Amino acid sequence: MHIHPIENTFGFGPKVEVVSITSLLPVRSNYHQASESQDAHLESPSVMQNLTPDILREIFSYCLPSDFSDPLSRVAPFNFSTVCWSWRDFVLNTPSLWASLDLSIYHQRCRDEIINASAPCADPIHTNCSKILYAWQRWLELSANYPLDITLDIAMARAPTAIAQIIRMSFQHQRRWRTFCVDCQVTILNPVITSITYAFDLPHHFEELNIRIINGNYQAFCGGRYRLDLRSADHVRKLIIPNARTIVSLPVTQMDRLTELHVFEIDMAALPCILRGAPNLAIISVGLRGDIYEENTPRIVLGKLSHLHVFMHRDNMTSLSQLLALLLAPSLKDLRLLCRYKEELPESNLWTTLKEFLERSCPPIEALELNSRGGRYNLGHRVASKTMSDEALIGILEGLPGLKRLHIQGSIVTSRLLSALTRDRSETSGGVLCPLLHDFPRQGDQDVLDLYQDKRKLTSLEE
């Protein structure tokens, strides 16, 4: 028998070759064992595959993105769908994972020379607007009919068309809103944003509206009007519209969960209806427009109201007096009546009405700010010795023994009022005015502050 010699596979001698082959045999055996183990593992459900839907939903919710500027394959829950078939099926069929949308784009992320409407998006990570728009559309599709939590925070010189489309698209889904928070500031007027209809028919499940849109010139856009329908929004917690006049359709529903109301300007015809249906309001910040048309309007009791800020101008003095005459707020701690414009308010019975409101409510006021005009006077402005408002204002301060912070500005600041504030008992009923007062802000009329400080020093020396 002719025996063929062993082929020298490795290029070494026979002994070396035998040793090499022998050393490879255990590796081959381990490979077969690992393959069998892997096959068995693939055939049986893994630990992650055995997680219940509730646990998966909780895990995934913590991984959702804060913005949509990255490529889709890197963003949750898109990237979860590539792990295994069970995860993909779960992710694509769980609308709640897609119901939270959050987009933030600022000047430093979209440079003017890049985001020009006629220029391509040069930076694929920060300014690829088409991908951001696609992601937003896909998110809305996969959220099915689930209530939406939308947050848009945009500050740009010029908004690309894709970004403006995102804003308009979000408004088109308002019947699905649960929370809708938008802060959009665009320096150059965008026609897509201008074309949006700012009318909100808020659904039953709606909870929070916080919207500020500045499209082009701020002052021009503040003239815009928002229309608000609250007939179904009985779950609403916050209404914040800081830069537009708001017209509310009547009637309004009972809103027991409403705790904050911030509106740039609202009609007095609707405000009493809102307040009467929201007994748990804690913070009110409003500008008023128009008058109350109802006669014999019943008292409005807001037992939890702690902050009341009202913005005034000469055309709504009557509205403010009507509002104060209606209110009863026994828990009020922070009261501010602020003049929105630089012109001085005319003499009126407003301060007497305010005094009656405070006497009726007996609130524990700690901070008080009263302005009869906005802005600042020139340093040469002379303080009047007294005005018609002195009696009412001194009476107000006499009824606020717990007052700690005070700011009064405008012609209502007189020498007589300052004398009373510096503990001149001859100007009061005999007691010390505001004994806890420690904060007289260093703003407003410099000569008023100087006079106040001089009187405090003189009083301290006399004591």
Image (tube, helix red, strand yellow):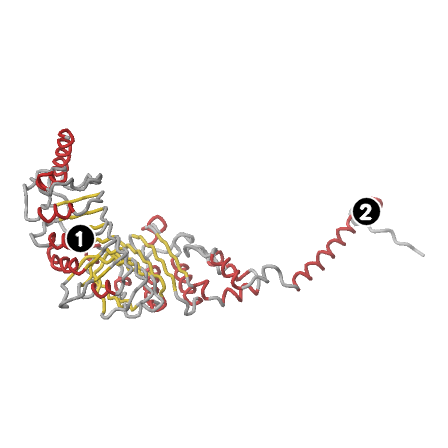
The residue most toward the top is 461
Q: Residue at x 69, y 62 (%)?
A: 40
Above/below status of 138 relative to 331: below
Q: Mark 1 sits on what residue?
A: 358
Q: Mark 2 sits on what residue?
A: 17
Element marked by disc 1: helix
Element marked by disc 2: helix
Residue 184 lies in quadrant: bottom left
Look at label 1 and name its amino acid.
Leu
Q: Position of residue 23 (x, y in %)?
A: 79, 47
Tell me whether the residue at label 2 lies in contact with that at label 1, contact meaning CB atoms closer than 8 angstroms: no
Task: Tell me the tag on residue 161.
Answer: none
Q: Is residue 117 visible?
A: no
For the residues labelled 2 and 1, the Cα–Cα distance comes to: 103 Å
Q: Position of residue 414 (x, y in %)?
A: 9, 42
Q: Nearer the viewer, residue 49 or 191?
A: 49
Q: Residue at x 5, y 48 (%)?
A: 388
The quarter of the rendered structure image containing the N terminus is bottom right
Q: Nearer the viewer, residue 287 or 62?
A: 287
Look at label 2 and name its amino acid.
Glu
First of labels 2, 1 by sequence position = 2
Q: Position of residue 6 (x, y in %)?
A: 85, 51
The total of numbered circles placed on residues is 2
Residue 257 lies in quadrant: bottom left
Q: Taking 315 as reference, is 161 left or right? A: right
The residue most toward the right is 1
The quarter of the rendered structure image containing the C terminus is top left
Q: What crowding class fits label 2: few (fewer than 14 Cα within 10 Å), some (14-19), or many (20 or more)?
A: some
Q: What crowding class fits label 1: few (fewer than 14 Cα within 10 Å), some (14-19), or many (20 or more)?
A: many
